Amino acid sequence: MSELTKLTLKAALDGLKSKSFSSVEITRAHIAAVEAARPLNAFVLETPDKALEMAAAADARIASGDAGRLEGAPLGIKDLFCTKGVRSTACSRILGNFVPEYESTVTANLFDDGAVMLGKLNLDEFAMGSSNETSAFGNVINPWKSASGGNKALTPGGSSGGSAAAVAADLCLGATATDTGGSIRQPAAFTGTVGIKPTYGRCSRWGIVAFASSLDQAGPIAKTVEDAAILLTSMAGHDPRDSTSLDVETPDWAPYVGRSVKGLRIGVPKEYRVDGMPAEIEKLWQDGIDWLKEAGAEIVEVSLPHTKYALPAYYIVAPAEASSNLARYDGMRYGFRAEGGNLTEIYENTRAEGFGQEVKRRILIGTYVLSAGYYDAYYLKAQKVRRRIADDFDQAWQTCDALLTPTAPSAAFALGERNADPIAMYLNDVFTVTTNLAGLPSISVPAGLDSGGLPLGLQVIGRALDEGTVFSVAGALEKAAGFRAKAERWW
Amino acid sequence: MTNAFTLKGRTGDWEIVLGLEVHAQVASNSKLFSGAAVGFGAGPNEQVSLVDAAMPGMLPVLNKYCVEQAVRTGLGLKAQINLKSRFDRKNYFYPDLPQGYQISQFEFPIVGEGEVIVDRIDGTSFTVRIERLHLEQDAGKSIHDLDPKATYVDLNRSGTALMEIVSKPDMRSPEDAAAYVKKLRAILITLGTCDGDMEKGNLRADVNVSVCRPGDYEKFRETGSFSHLGTRCEIKNVNSYRFIQQAINVEARRQIEILEDGGKVDQETRLYDPTKNETRSMRSKEEAHDYRYFPDPDLLPLVLDPAWVKEIEAGLPELPDAKKARLMADYGLSAYDASVLISDGEVAAFFEEAAKGRDAKLVANWTLNDLLGRLGKDGLEITASPISAADIGALVGLIEDGTISGKIARTVFEHMWDGEGAPAAIVEKHGLVQITDTGAIETAVDALIAANPDKAAAVKEKPQAIGWFVGQVMKETGGKANPAAVNEILKAKLGL
Amino acid sequence: MAIDAATVRKVARLARIAEPEERIEPLVQELNGILQWIEQLAEVDTDGVEPLTSVVHATLTLRDDVVTDGGDAARVLSNAPKSTDGFYVVPKVVE
Ligand SMILES: [Mg+2]
Ligand SMILES: [Zn+2]
């Protein structure tokens, strides 16, 4: 493989700017890598022609001196983002060959800054899953293999499994992703990549297929903290077409990476020390604490007493919103339509055949918790618990500036290993889901390897709109951890 | 309160109880949550945005003008304006409901309780309490008759802003229900928040009908407990005053029949079929609707700036009730005339224009009886009247200064209707000037008495027989003699 | 609040998802498992707690009433499974 695919986004942008290589060259290198990596099943649609066309246009802009922030950089796009003229499916059969007549705000922002699209990335169907096993296009395979687990294919995590695998395997310089309960951070942790979910409202949701509107937030998966900062700066911004988009200025976050954490107070929430947490994760967490202490931060213990209720609350709120958000997939105006004897049968067959098992399960739960007589006991209760969880964080900010936790309770597991028990699968998000409920920015940084040589991540959580501090702390962790490991190429 | 409308049954008397949910389309340029145009007559799906078609990832953004119109309407209904309200999703599947849910306001509507004072034809009035007004999206249109095997869907109407105005069950007769809608329509038109076009469905009513025994309704009003009332059925989308009344009548009859046969009325949604004059159930009974309302997570709470509400209030036009009071006070009109005038803001404006410096009662008569009658015959609105307000005023002016009699005025009016121009010119052209020259009248009277000495003698015994003499003089003068002058001269010459 | 087979059928109907008879019992088990786990929320004291519907500390911004979209039926019909003369064509609706 070409050395060009091994570059970080930052290094590639520098090389493009200094004309060390062209966008067409680096794009070609990535197209070849994508083709060679088909066994990973990270891409559900490759768009090499479009990529080369965009790359040529980028080169022209570089030549004429009006290059954008991401000019010429080839990226992968999660197939939850609607891309104009390019099939967008949310990895569900129900969308069939849906080709949007519009471009999502986030991808439009990236392309306006000169980014090149290599294709659309695999994900759990409608972003519902933590292992990328619910996609209509099949599983994504983690580029990493465990030294102790035989040659078993591992999950890249989910739902942004395609984005994480593609970045980890050097198929793109960075990727878009989305996070409703941990779908950026858990796959990042499972693949040794960096993933940030910004403050709710930073990135426009316009043009992103909705899963749970009050929780969904886009963000990047990247090779380094700095790359993540560069990408997020481009993706974020106020969008009047999304009523929940925040009308605030978007900082340039790259300079925050490398900033000293001296004097920052880092909270360690005691409730994240859950039963049965592997010793390796516990150890990694302690490493992180030590690194930040050494870097001059002050470590404080904090309490987030309602942490254990976050997942159950999430599994009311998210399915409830999803049950309604996914009602539009009815086979009437676009997508797949099944046969049936009458209208109701056609609705029922379309949705039975069009949706996969996990999506249907969540729609049924969501429908149930909103139905007459149960709303107060479930939905309203969950919204109140959600307030308690948000209040916990507000309380914590009295004594600290950022929080440090593990990203996930385990390293990547084998595909097929946790499918039988939905709750066991849901528990993957136990450390990440709290910040979706509270709308806070949080990042996963690769910080070490487990005994099988699989990457593990640490999570940094910040105050609302304080991505700057999150990037600074993440940068300090990245530097201290000195994580350089890459998956050995087997594909 | 007047006596409730009573229906006779086999087992005794029944009364009806009516509550209305009126859907009024906001007269906006674009839709409630999208930038597609609102209008009538465009080609299918030509006024549809990606949001209206519920494409994946599309999001609603609220139209400020629609919010303003809801507030204006709320103020016009003397209602509570809720500075904080919220949008909820009402979930159900239907091919003309692209999102699979309607964005509406369930728990926290933008407008709370208010009232409407409704005038009856007999000059009495009653109050209908308003429960709430909320903003919501309209659905698209399903067309069933273009293809025997398929339904065609046009989403042009999808997402159009509606104000749903919900009354309390305060109407007790079909006429009262129609009068309420009429009054509500006048208020909306005056405010300019809805064009009130019922034919296009821009104003339509869902009528809740139940029946009860005499006395039950009063118990309900005393206690507020619906247990005193019968089970109600909702008749959907009735869009004319006539159909509202017919639908109520047949539905009440249907319910009474069920109850008198020992049955039970099922709470359900029904449809009125005017061709068969019957109501029928709209959805199969086993499928109870469960709309799973919940706050729309795509939208934040709607919070109104009190200063903005004040500003809207300051800009309100004169409302029908205030106008009615003013018309009665300033022009000395009867309550009935005033309420007919305000039922249509255009008519009231016409009247006021015509009445400038004239005898207001005469102008009201000419406007309400002659002109509206004539317009009605041709199915015309007052805005399309071939006779201007100024000309009606001029016509009354000619009567007032004695140039023509009321009778001649009718002739002049016909010429005006035919477009012959200003009344003075018509009078001139057709020689219709009234004879007020007493000399000419005296000559005629003298001749008449001389020719009919016996009748002149008889009238002394029977003074009411003077009518014959008046008629003869008028005939003699081609109707142009001033009747007052004729009377006076006759009385003098006959020695009455 | 355990879910039974009838509830699963009712909910599947509301959600317009055909669930074959042989899936009903497994769904009863799955959904009850999830709901039982969810019910630990009952432990949380939420008396007097205002439900949180949005984490955004802002209120709705409003747009001006101008026409900015529409006027292109082909654009909204481009992905339709079936359309004719500018209409979406859907299965016969019997009211
Ligand atoms: Mg209603
Ligand atoms: Zn309504």
Image (cartoon, grey):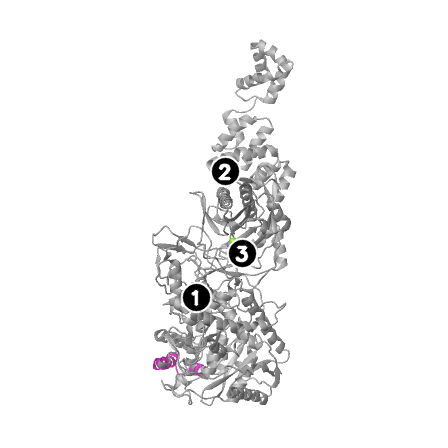
Where does the N terminus of chain A fall, quadrant-wise? bottom left
Which amino acid type corresponds to the residue marked 1 in the rendered image? Pro
Q: Earlier in the sequence, mark 3 or mark 1?
A: 1
Residues in magenta, as a range: A11-38
User: Within the magenta stretch, is there residue A168?
Assistant: no
Which amino acid type corresponds to the residue marked 2 in the rendered image? Ser
Q: Tell me whether marks 2 and 3 sit on the same chain.
A: yes
User: Would you say residue B270 is visible in this rendering?
Assistant: yes
Task: Identify the subunit bearing mark 2.
Answer: B
Q: Which residue is mark 1?
A: B56
- Residue C32 x/y as whole percent: 49, 71
Task: Identify the subunit bearing mark 3.
Answer: B
Q: Which residue is mark 3?
A: B135
Helix or strand or loop: what does disc 2 sit on? loop
Task: Identify the subunit bearing mark 1.
Answer: B
Q: Earlier in the sequence, mark 2 or mark 1?
A: 1
User: Would you say residue A334 is visible in this rendering?
Assistant: no
- Residue B218 x/y as whole percent: 62, 46
Q: Earlier in the sequence, mark 2 or mark 3?
A: 3
